[in-house]
Image (cartoon, helix red, strand yellow):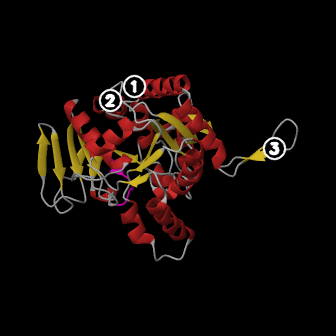
Amino acid sequence: MRVILDCQHLKLYPVGKPGFSGGTETMVRVLARGLAEAGHAVHVVTPDLEEDEQRGANEWWWSPSCYPTRADVVVMVGSLAGAEHYAGDALVYATNGAELPDRLTPEIAGLVAAFPVFSEVHADLLCKTNPGVLRERCVVTGLGVDLDDYAPDPIKVPGRIWVGNDPSRGLWHVLDVFDLVKNAVPDATLHVTYDVDGLFGKMKWHQNALAEMLWECKRRLATTPGVTLLGAVDRATLVREQLEAQVHVWPSDPSNVGTQLHGLSQMDAAAAGCALVLSDVEAFPEVFGEAATIFPTIGTFVPTPEGEGYRIDAQDYADRVVELMQDAEQWADASRRARRLAERHTWEDVVGNWVLLLDRIDAARTEAAE
């Protein structure tokens, strides 16, 4: 089949060029290569190329100024805006959120043959926030990990914590947890691989809570002993940091709905054999529940049989991190479970899910033609 992946709305991170990237951008690159290798003719329209490139026998990348518009299947990534310029037998909307930029009336949503999503939670939130989306058209294709990047038995740095997520989702909580961890494990270290400076530069003069949080995070990153901010690193450095880390703790509590619909960084950490300590926000329990320690988000009130109850705080996360650092048997068990989980969520699995989706669309198209 001839497939177009329109990614013109992905402008936060590089898509067609190398560089610090996000989960959706990574998925597009893997998907283009994987579908092409499966025999489909794949055309990717990306916002960050000046000239078209052929990257394989069946794989073409196009700039926004010149690209094909006819295909068997048109996949709009991130937004449906511009879909009217294409001629295709089937329209697919690959959303990377739940609160969409498009007004999906039942009429518009009815034109979409399938909504590939990252998780069941993603599908549920998508339908809840967009009543026109039919649940039966949501297909969990997921996100994956490249196991070839991760040695199965890495040498860990004792007491090392790694995080590499958008700071607005919980970095301030991580810093609180780390302060408490260091009380019990003075040699503990925290390595942060994210372009915090870039985000800070864009947000620092805004008069809102996120800007205030970033100012405080910047101060603490620079002054807390044991913390290293590596910034936006290349893939090889990122993988090395993940392989060296003993624990990945991410008490995520994002300010917006639909921003923790999978957890690609967490899956990378799982592949690297990190023990996982996560919050129960959105898709984390679904995707990582069998391998991670899952706590309610910080500030959640938890009732007790006695009727008093208590609120989850950073100390709950820190206690578990310290326990994993100091108990070799518990850490080894958590590390093995994380790695086994990652082995069942590879990019090959994701491409396979997309191939099945395209086969289903092709079968429906053939049946309609008859």
Q: Residue sitting at 54 percent across and 57 percent down? A: 172
Residue 235's disc number: none
In this view, which residue lies farthest toward the front?
186
Circle 1 Cα neighbour tier, 10 Å, few/some/many (<14 / 14–19 / ≥20) = some
For residue 169, above or below residue 343: below
Which quadrant of the rendered structure holds the N terminus? top left
Mark 3 neighbour class, 10 Å CA radius: few under 14, some 14 to 19, many 20 or more: few
| Nearer-the-camera pick, 327 or 192 | 327
Mark 2 is surrounded, within 10 Å at the Cα level, by few (under 14), some (14 to 19) or many (20 or more) other residues, namely some
Which residue was labeled with disc 2?
A: 147
The residues tagged by marks 3 and 2 sit, at their Cα atoms, a distance apart of 42 Å
Name which of mark 1 and mark 2 comes first in the sequence.
Answer: 2
Q: Is residue 39 above or below residue 128?
A: above
Res 160 quadrant in image? top left
Q: CA distance from mark 3 to mark 1?
A: 38 Å
Kind of residue sitting beneath label 2:
Leu
Q: Nearer the viewer, mark 3 or mark 2?
A: 3
**Circle 3: residue type:** Gly
Q: Is residue 366 magenta?
A: no
| Tag 1–tag 2 contact (CB < 8 Å) | yes
Q: Which mark is residue 343?
A: 1
Identified by mark 1, the residue type is Glu
In the picture as drawn, the residue positioned furthest to the right comes out as 306
